[in-house]
Image (cartoon, grey):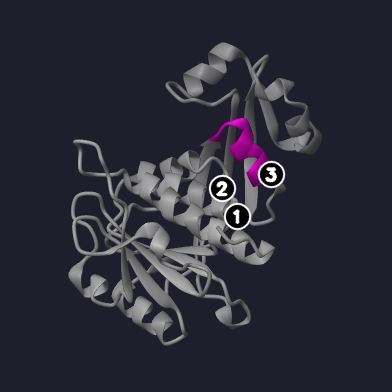
């Protein structure tokens, strides 16, 4: 399992700032705010911000410091542990869902997956130490503050970890297009499941694919036979959420 990682980051934007400030997971070194910018006018933000760590910069000074960034007039410099060093006890929850990312090397996709996972109630994300984009400023920024509420687990050996979790009564579902598989909405996701996502270009590695109990696919009608990996995660994650809500409400469709 991964060692504890405490790193420094900078995130921009009102939503990210609010998430970081409200979290007890991170320590804020300072916050730069552009005078007259959107952030300085946001009442929700101003109500929770600590003035002692805020630097109000003139527009020219702020833009020189953060050129070519979509900031909404705010930058938060913070540090803390973004990667969990151990698994919690999963035995008390029956409908837990983990995402396992195999060779997702694009930080934009990684960040979008974190954002989707938070919105869809995913319990955690496993990613390979050697075959993944690192958790950096880009990943956190694209997640729009969602990283605060999503457990990230950096795994040395993803294949072995998946096999271990199978022994803990997890079902493993691989999302893979172009092979014989069940349609994504034909599989039940309401139990203890791991959803494995491979890279757009290379898919899931064979040794991990062989560990899957089910293979799921999302058919496409366009001429480009490739769905963005974050869009594929969104489709399957919200299908799981739909099934859980349907089950909890006793709705049958």
Residue position for label 3: 21
Residue 232 pos. (x, y %): 36, 49
In this rendering, would 47 be left or right of 113? Answer: right
The image quadrant of residue 112 is top left
Q: Nearer the viewer, mark 3 or mark 2?
A: 2
Task: Evaluate if marks 3 and 2 touch, with contact meaning CB atoms under 8 Å apart.
Answer: no
Q: Which residue is mark 2?
A: 146
Question: The magenta stretch spans which residues?
Answer: 12-21
Main secondary structure along the magenta-highlighted residues? helix
48 lies above or below 130: above
Disc 3 and disc 2: Cα gap in Å?
13 Å
Which residue, given by chain and number where applicable, does mark 1 sit on?
149
Crowd class of label 1 (few under 14; some 14 to 19; many from 20; radius 10 Å)? some
Tell me the quadrant of the picture where the C terminus can be found: bottom right
On-image quarter of the N terminus:
bottom left
Q: Could you tell me residue 76's position as x and y percent? A: 59, 37
Cβ–Cβ under 8 Å for marks 1 and 3:
no
Q: Position of residue 35 (x, y in %)?
A: 67, 16
Residues at discs 1 and 2 in contact (Cβ within 8 Å): yes
User: Visible in this render: residue 202?
Assistant: yes
């Amino acid at each position: 399992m991964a060692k504890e990682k405490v790193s420094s980051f900078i995130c921009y934007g009102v939503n990210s700032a609010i998430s970081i400030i409200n979290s007890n997971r991170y320590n804020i070194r300072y916050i730069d705010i552009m005078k007259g910018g959107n952030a300085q006018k946001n009442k929700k933000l101003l109500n929770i911000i600590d003035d002692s760590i805020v630097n109000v910069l003139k527009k020219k000074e702020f833009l020189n410091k953060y050129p070519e960034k979509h900031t909404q007039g705010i930058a938060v410099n913070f540090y803390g542990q973004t990667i969990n060093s151990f698994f919690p006890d999963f035995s008390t929850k029956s409908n837990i869902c983990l995402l396992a990312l195999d060779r997702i090397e694009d930080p934009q996709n990684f960040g979008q997956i974190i954002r989707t996972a938070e919105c869809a109630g995913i319990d955690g994300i496993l990613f390979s130490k050697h075959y993944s984009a690192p958790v950096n400023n880009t990943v956190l920024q694209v997640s729009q503050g969602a990283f605060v509420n999503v457990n990230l687990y950096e795994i040395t050996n993803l294949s072995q970890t998946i096999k271990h979790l199978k022994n803990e009564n997890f079902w493993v579902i691989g999302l893979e297009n172009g092979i014989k598989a069940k349609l994504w909405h034909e599989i039940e996701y309401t139990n203890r499941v791991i959803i494995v996502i491979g890279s757009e270009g290379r898919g899931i590695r064979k040794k991990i694919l062989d560990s899957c109990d089910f293979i799921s696919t999302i058919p496409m009608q366009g001429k480009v036979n490739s769905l963005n990996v974050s869009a594929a995660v969104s489709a399957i994650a919200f299908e799981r959420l739909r099934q859980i809500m349907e089950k909890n409400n006793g709705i049958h469709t």
